[in-house]
Image (spheres, rainbow, N blue to C red):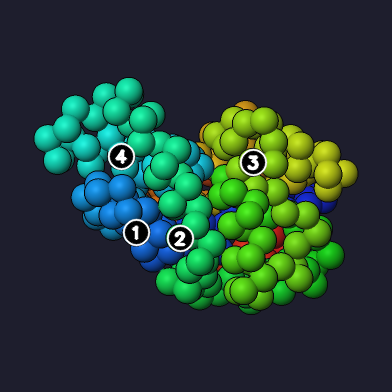
Amino acid sequence: MKSLQLQAVMIDLDGTMVDTIGDFEVALNRALTDLQVPPASRALIERSIGKGSEHLIRTVLAHQLAQAGVPGDAREVEALFNPVWTRYEHHYLDINGEFSEVFPGVMEGLAQLKAMGLPLACLTNKPLSFTRPLMAAKGLAPYFAKVFGGDSFERKKPDPLPLLKTCEALQSSPARTLMVGDSSNDAQAANAAGCPVVLMTYGYNHGEPIRNTPARAWLDSMTQLGDLLQG
């Protein structure tokens, strides 16, 4: 990795820096309950996150409607989407960070990267209105020169556009800008953008083993990233 002569690093948020499953579960199930939709299991929520809140809500709605014996077709899902989104946003902002924890090793890993002089950007599919308060609450914000959410650009990961736009903001070359994530979503976006990618093994990845996704490396802790880059 040292041979890449990195200019900057982009880091995903959910499943990479913060274990936010608890926040997703509480906020979404409170929203579903408000609309008389049965609550979703943590397992369903975990394998549905990573592609933005819109995808999460639509996926969970279709599943829950089907489980309740209601045809979960596109029309039924869309009819409920906006009301659920409104309640979800309300509940998420109310509990943001309350049921989540920074993964072990993340703070130490960020300190190592900062000491190396690498500019950092947080690049997540989470809405920016959720992202900034969470990063501030968890002490992550001071490490990042740039923060971009799922609504910062016209398209979300796995589209390469957010990565390319983030590289522009960091004034770095994609080939010399590392993407650190936890899912095939991050890897697909990085590959399409021409960025090297490293994947954390403890994340969500839609319920699939992350080591099945090609990457420069798979790490069990972000403390290993500094050693990898200096090795």
Which residue is tagged 4?
61
**Could you classify mark 1 by the number of other residues whose Cα lies within 10 Å: few (under 14), some (14-19), or many (20 or more)?**
many
Which residue is tagged 1?
30
Identified by mark 1, the residue type is Arg
> Which of these two is toward me, 145 or 113?
145
**Could you classify mark 2 by the number of other residues whose Cα lies within 10 Å: few (under 14), some (14-19), or many (20 or more)?**
some
Residue 212: image location, x then y, percent: 39, 42
Q: Between marks 4 and 3, how big is the CA–CA gap?
A: 21 Å
Identified by mark 2, the residue type is His
Instruction: Identify which residue is drawn at 77% across, 54% down.
Output: 146
The quadrant in which the C terminus is found is: bottom right
Instruction: Identify which residue is drawn at 25% across, 47% down.
Output: 37
Instruction: Identify which residue is drawn at 66% across, 75% down.
Output: 139
Which residue is tagged 2?
91
**Mark 2 vs 3, N-terminal side:** 2
**Mark 2 vs 4, N-terminal side:** 4
Taking the view exactly as shown, the residue that stands out farthest to the right is 171
